[in-house]
Image: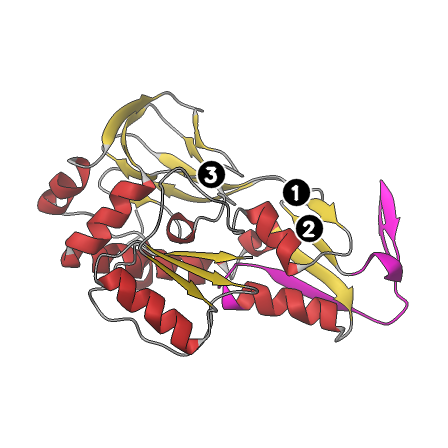
Amino acid sequence: MPESSSETEIAPTLTEAQWTRLTTRARPHDVVAGEQVIATGDENYPMILIESGELELVRGSLRWLDEEVLAIMGPGHFAGELGLLNGQRAFLSVRAATPGRIWLMEPAALRQVLAEDDELGDLILHTLWARRESLRKGSAAMTLKFVGIGDSRELIALQRFAERLDLIHTAVALEPGATISHPAHQWGPEDMPLAFIQGEPFVRATPAMVAEQLGLSYEPTSEGAVDVVVIGGGPAGLAAAIYGASEGLSTLLLEAVAPGGKLVPPPASRTSSVFRSV
């Protein structure tokens, strides 16, 4: 594994005590070489703890790019991305490079760790944020690509949505009247803006459409009633949701675009809240 401080922040090695506390909330799974543990587009996928063997983090092939192995992770490390916490469908896949044993921690168990274990909560959150920032600089940003005309409000709305949800994405602004060509299709101004999600084109894209495709739009679950529902994700609404979650309340925040506002959450808020666009 890499040794630089930046790489250590992205891929910290768990201590024996940390490993034990995490695996008590996970289930073991033996993998064979080439097995796909998480597929692009999966919902409610687990965080993965690696006991033996190696896993590949893969950006799948797009219409204009072949697949790329972004990282290889070995024993004592964990695989996961920030989408684990906001419900976003997996935009990268995880594949076994060698036979080995891994432990699968479901999202509910992960949220419990974040709420109850300050040390592990800080480590996991900082790692997930560091990974998100690192992925912005590479080809992972091509898994969500917006193409639109200049500074049109439709393109700006998509960018604002992605920025407020901190989604890894790329945006391309075209000159008025421009067209773009693909071997299977040609798109003109009437099709803009385009959203390419995992290489699949969606014409006249809106934030709601993108949210639905990414698994970020709200859908009732089988978990039953929540304790608190907050309407509006501005600074006040976001603060109310975070502080409600920090008190152990099941909290639902509904927002037309995405939560936003300048706010530093309290250390205790290993949020059990759910943020969704509607």
The amino acid on which the numbered mark 1 sits, given as a three-letter code, is Leu
Q: Alpha carbon of mark 1 to alpha carbon of mark 3: how far?
A: 20 Å
Q: Is residue 115 at least partly visible in the picture? A: yes
Q: Give coordinates of residue 134: x percent, y percent.
A: 44, 60
Look at 39% across and 77% down and name the residue there: 236
Q: Give coordinates of residue 13: x percent, y percent.
A: 21, 48
Q: Mark 1 touching mark 3, by CB under 8 A?
A: no
Q: Nearer the viewer, mark 3 or mark 2?
A: 3
Q: Is residue 223 left or right of residue 115?
A: right
Q: Is residue 181 left or right of residue 138?
A: right
Does dot 2 land on a helix, a strand or a loop? strand
Disc 2 crowd rating (10 Å Cα; few below 14, some 14-19, many 20+) is: many
Q: Which mark is residue 196?
A: 2
The amino acid on which the numbered mark 3 sits, given as a three-letter code, is Glu
Question: Magenta segment range?
Answer: 164-192
Vertical placement of residue 83 versus 9, above or below: above
Q: Which mark is residue 236?
A: none
The residue identified by callout 1 is: 62
Q: Mark 3 touching mark 2, by CB under 8 A?
A: no
* Picture quarter with the C terminus: bottom right
Does dot 1 land on a helix, a strand or a loop? loop
Along the line of sight, which residue is nearer the eye, 105 or 181?
A: 105
Look at 22% across and 41% down and name the residue there: 76
Q: Earlier in the sequence, mark 1 or mark 2?
A: 1
Q: Give coordinates of residue 15: x percent, y percent.
A: 13, 47
Q: Is residue 74 at least partly visible in the picture? A: no
Q: Is residue 195 left or right of residue 223?
A: right
Look at 36% across and 42% down and name the residue there: 224
Q: Mark 1 touching mark 2, by CB under 8 A?
A: yes
The residue identified by callout 3 is: 43
The amino acid on which the numbered mark 2 sits, given as a three-letter code, is Phe
